[in-house]
Image (tube, rainbow, N blue to C red):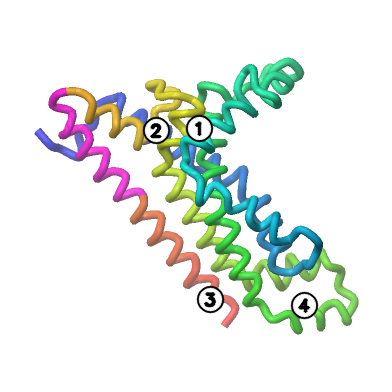
Amino acid sequence: MFDIFHLTSLEWEAVRLSLLVGLAAVAGSSPFGIFFGWLLARRAFPGKSLLDAFLHLPMVIPPVVTGYILLLLFGRKGVLGRFLYNITGFTFAFNWKGAALASAVIAFPLMVRAIRISMESVDKELEAAARTLGASRVRVFFTITMPLSFTGILAGVVMAFARSLGEFGATITFVSNIPGETRTLPLALYSQLQVPGGEFGAARLCVVALIIAFTSLIFSEYLARRNKKKYD
């Protein structure tokens, strides 16, 4: 029977792994998202349009292509993966860290776009005034730009997390579909649909995914409202 509270051990493992992968993806990519969001919002330099287009490539190319590129770069025999494994013994191939990398790459454009738009809305005159009073660029960034664009940064992080939960193509191409290791919610749902009678398990996982995504959005809205009250 369909019962949301009676997931199998493999289904719970997929839920746990999805949360781990999503959190690792946003934790690892957030510093880069903030940096590139600020760079595109506040700096003018040659090749800016090319950098912008490059950062947004994962939004417009098929996720399977992204996964294949990651495999060529970070697989055990990849250009970077072989070097990384020989030097440190670390590999992204066929484990949850590779799933987190794939999710981070796919979700990164959404994070950068939200952060960039938010930082562009911050009044430059406030930053200029702080600079004339002797504040360094770093201090201006952390005391003015970041706090005033916090809502956008939070929105970018939440969108990236939600996108990570739904990542399928790049993950299955890069790290395969290994139970307990790389089988996240979307892959588990797909696997359920491939076996007779698996539609009930797929429905349970679908409901769980909706609950997690909805909870994330509610929590994001709560933090955004608190931040708005703080600076009103």
N-term-proximal mark, 1 vs 3: 1
- Residue lying at 56% horizontally and 22% vertically, measured from the top left: 93
Give me the C-alpha separation between circle 1 and circle 3.
Answer: 34 Å
Residue 139 lies in quadrant: bottom right
Q: CA–CA distance between discs 3 and 2?
A: 35 Å
- Which segment is the magenta one? 196-212
Secondary-structure class at tag 1: helix
Does 210 lie within the magenta span? yes
Residue located beneath label 4 in the image = 127
**Image position of 10 (left or right of 172):** left
Other residues around mark 4 within 10 Å, as few (<14) / some (14–19) / many (≥20): some
Rounded to the nearest whole Å, what is the CA distance between mark 4 and mark 1? 39 Å
Q: CA distance from mark 4 to mark 2?
A: 43 Å
128 relative to 165, above or below: below
> N-terminal of the two: label 3 or label 2?
2
- Which residue carries the number 1 mark? 99
Say which of 114 and 161 sits in front: 114
